[in-house]
Image (tube, rainbow, N blue to C red):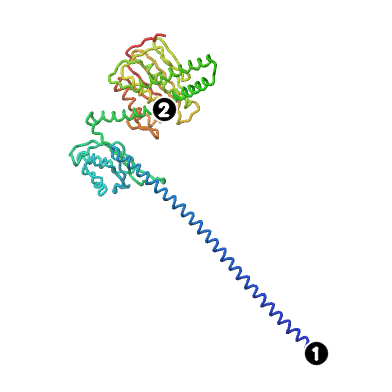
Amino acid sequence: MRHILTLLLIFDSMGQKAFAQNIATASGMATHAISFGLILIVFFVLILKYLSEKKSNRLLQKANDELIAAKNALTRSELRFTAMAENLDDIIWFTDTELRRMVYINKSYERIYGKSVESLYNNPESYIECIHPDDLPDLTLRYRNVTVPKNNIKHRVINRQTGEIRWVLSRYAPVKNSDGETVFISGIISDITPLVNAENEKAVQKQIIAQQAKFASLGEMIGAISHQWRQPLNTLYLYMQLMEESENKEEIAKYIEDSMKLIDHMSDTIEDFRDFFKTGKQPEPFDAPRTVTQILRMLAPQMKANNITYHVNCTCEKRSFSCSNNFDPGNPPCRNLVSGIANEFKHAILNILQNAKEALTEQNRPERDIYIDMSAGEGKFTIAITDSAGGIDTEFLPHIFEAYSSDKKEGTGMGLYMTKTIIEDKMNGRLWAENTEIGAKFTIELPCISSETQQP
């Protein structure tokens, strides 16, 4: 029995020793595993940090390259702007929003004001020393609110070097950023002394407006020439290809005949445009219906390109005719002479038709029509131009013929003002506007010198 108990004690001692060894072994393995895991974590963290830094460096380099490119582009733009501005006769200037710091002004300031640009950079209000004392109070009042665009502030300046008094036309406007915040005030000052010396203030204003209206008409006519010539040139090119490919003499002769007709048509077009830009000095009799159809013939391709149809009706004492821009209006069978400068009358008609075209295209209506109704009787020639654009805003209608008054975003307010000046001041006629059921209607009434029927 004693031997058995001894054996049991020996076995129990051996089991406890093995158990302790197992625990020690397991503990060592767990320590190694934790250490290995920590090493892996550190390794991955280092890799991620390396990749992140590499990506950051790449993005930083890209941003730096873009910044350098933007700076270079800005420098080039500044150089181009400076080169352009320094060669202008007008003064170009930029200031901060409170007119307390001059950001830029070109050298024309020195020629007109007789002071250096450095003096203006040092003291932005030093220009006041050059303003004529009689104009200073009004000028200061009009410059008070710089956040509102001001146009055509006319005043006198005294050249500090020569003592010469110059008339200038000043305009300025706020420059806004993408958030609508005003960041700069920009302005332009033009020397208009020659104009003021030539005529009185009212005449000068009319001359400026007339010149600007003429340039606007020039743009319209260039567009009309483009539309007039595009299709004939394409057709001529096609005829040339067909003649190269054809061996049939009759076909070639037919292509040549058709080509000559197109060339004659293009030649007639050039004559129409040349007549439009002729400068007339003295009023003289001209055929009003024929003059109107000449303008329509020039504008017909533009009308078609904008899906606008014009309808012409002429009712005279002896004969009448009708046509649309699907056909060449030709020369009306009636002849009604009025007195004036034909090209100025053309400008007046063009301004009304251009306004009608813009109104129709802006409204984006499916049906776009312009009606031109001419009539003569009792010593008067009348032309009424009506569009189908819905009419003029009733609040704006009483001011439609005022200078610089426009209800269009890009309008200058010069066209209709000049039209009324031509019709009423120069041709002793009448011009008025009204709304109809379909749109705006402009009516011109002129004294008619004579009426007769054209020979067929």
Q: Quick one: 434 or 315, which is closer to the camera?
A: 315
Q: Which residue is mark 2?
A: 223
The residue depicted at 52 percent of the width and 61 percent of the height is 50
Using the image, tell me which numbered label, if any, was put on residue 269.
none
Would you identify the image quadrant in which residue 199 lies?
A: top left
Q: Name the residue at the bottom extreme.
A: 2
Q: Which residue is mark 1?
A: 3
Q: Name the residue at the top extreme.
A: 455
Amino acid type assigned to the residue bearing label 1 in the image: His
* Residue 416 point in image, percent of width and height: 35, 27
**Secondary element type, mark 2:** helix
- Left or right? Give the position of 410 relative to 115: right
* Residue 431 point in image, percent of width and height: 34, 23
Amino acid type assigned to the residue bearing label 2 in the image: Gly
* Residue 369 point in image, percent of width and height: 46, 24
Judge whether residue 241 can be spotted in this image. Answer: yes
